[in-house]
Image (cartoon, coloured by chain):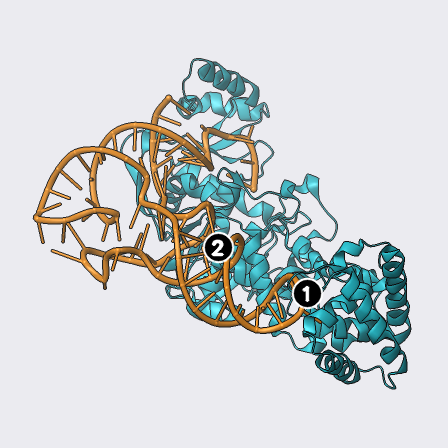
Amino acid sequence: MTQVRTRFAPSPTGYMHIGNLRSGLYAYLFAKSQGGKFLLRIEDTDQERFIDGATELIYRTLKDVGMSWDEGPDVGGDYGPYVQSERKAMYLPYAQMLIKSGHAYRCFCTKEELDERRAAAQAKGETFKYDKHCLHMDESEQREYMAQGRPYVIRQNVPTEGTTSFTDLIFGTITVNNSELDDNVLIKADGMPTYNFANVVDDHLMEISHVMRGMEYLASAPKYNLLYEAFGWEIPQYIHMTPIMRDAQHKLSKRDGDASYEDFINKGYLKEAIVNYIALLGWNPGDERERFTLSELCEAFSVQGMSKSPAIFDPAKLTWLNAQYIRELDAQEFTAHAAPYYKQAGIAHMNSDVLCRILQPRVEVFCQIPDMVDFLASYDEEFDLELFTNKKSKTDADVSRGVLELVLPKLRELPEWTEDALHALLMGTAQAQDMKNGTLLWPVRIAMAGKAVTPGGAIEIAVLLGRKETLSRMEAALCRLKAGKG
RNA sequence: GCUCGGUUCGUCUAGUGGCCUAGGACACCGCCCUCUCACGGCGGGAACAGGGGUUCGACUCCCCUACCGGGUACCA
């Protein structure tokens, strides 16, 4: 196998788990870094849980982040079909080949009796292992059972002695005692292959050079090798990937509510940030770079940088990275992303240039916008007058009253309600009064916003609110300050 | 229980026997900037799971223990 071929084999579950996406991403990056092919295979054997549109969601997500596949159900390829349910008939003949060569055998033991024996063994604290009972069955008896139409499974006949080794590109060579391997089912009683068997056959048929999959399959790798050897097939390279954790002992799961790609997009995370972040969760480039586009990842990726231990998902770092990407957006892009949130906050009609200017450096995730600007559309007219007191700006209720009385008439007469004009007026007034900028600006801002913390300052807020609203809020505040004075 | 694997700041990680007084990033704290909050700039605290070896010298190699995870299905 000279060409690197990797595959991403998701199940159409109706949502794209972030850990799953990362597995696909690594498979994609590895293939691309090696000039190889990346294939998409849909593993839809779990027919019972068929979800409408689930396959399309997979396509859409991969396309959205820019992970294009060279072969797959929709684009075709020479190794199809790429949907597992369409491959159903392919597996049985391979299992039969194994029976012929003695590497597998029919087993007529029923699930019920096996379950019972397993339970009994576990009760005694022992590990249950199939005893190869049916391997030693008379051929005549076997024929009789088959004639009777008794259901049977096909089991792998693993050696009872010796050891089996396999090599993983991340974990190195791992050796296990064959005595610990069980004769697992290859073909179920209903004729369908088990996941592990289907994978071996599919990966071989599709000439997958590097089998990249989750750690949970590490333990079955020895049995895979035994199978490849029994068939006389070339053994692929294995790359087992660690899971993404919610905390030290739990995987990030669907239950966490925000484990899917869509969830993040809906909250206002940028796809570039998501891809960049998950790439770094369990992989590092070997230098201190942290910002990567997809194509930069393709260049930088290598399995040497992949981690041996699970990584805990850190929403704070994702958010930071997202903020970095948001700051790099041009004004138009920013506004396009922010628009739905402007609408939600009732400020869609306001000056988007100013909004962009005050929000872009502050927003880390777009969904934060409504909370940040809630005071623009409507504010709390009964806000605490204590807000007018600020030590650093040297203001209190009295000073504020004075400032508002001084500034209001000038604002009423301001010919043009523009940022420049407001700036000149307010700053000019402060200077003329020999006042700190803050002493003048603080009361103005508080009067307009009714809250201590606002994105942007008095001037920007005044522009956004417009003359009428600005004046009315300031008048109301002045009125209350006078009343408070008594 | 058995078995396989993992273990560096709170988190993601660099580190492959001397370059380590253990580096970076996020988070946190402080200062500067400043009309608030941010942005930005500067600075700070913060880790080799524990114990034995091996070696002139261990974060790096070996063994043991602890903890965490995987596997132990006619699930994937």
Which residue position holds label 1? Answer: A394
Residue drawn 72% across the image and 47% down it = A51
Tell us which disc is closer to us: 2 or 1. Answer: 1
Camera-side residue of A186 and A382 = A382
Q: Are marks 2 and 1 in contact (CB under 8 Å)?
A: no
The mark nearer the N terminus, 2 or 1, is 2
Amino acid tagged 2: Leu
Query: Could one spot residue A342 in this view of the protein?
Result: no
- Residue at left 71%, top 44%? A50
What chain letter is assigned to the residue under label 2? A
Q: Residue furthest bottom?
A: A415
The residue closer to the viewer here, A330 or B40, is B40
Query: A324 or A246: which is nearer to us?
Result: A324
| Image position, residue B22 (x, y; %) | 31, 56
Instruction: Estimate the x, y position of residue A284 in percent, counting from the top left.
Output: 42, 60
How dense is the environment of label 2, judged by Cα within 10 Å: few (below 14), some, or many (20 and up)? many
Q: Chain of mark 1?
A: A
The quadrant in which residue A398 appears is: bottom right
Relative image position of residue A216 (x, y in whole percent): 47, 41
Q: Quadrant of the C terminus of chain A?
A: bottom right
Helix or strand or loop: what does disc 2 sit on?
A: loop
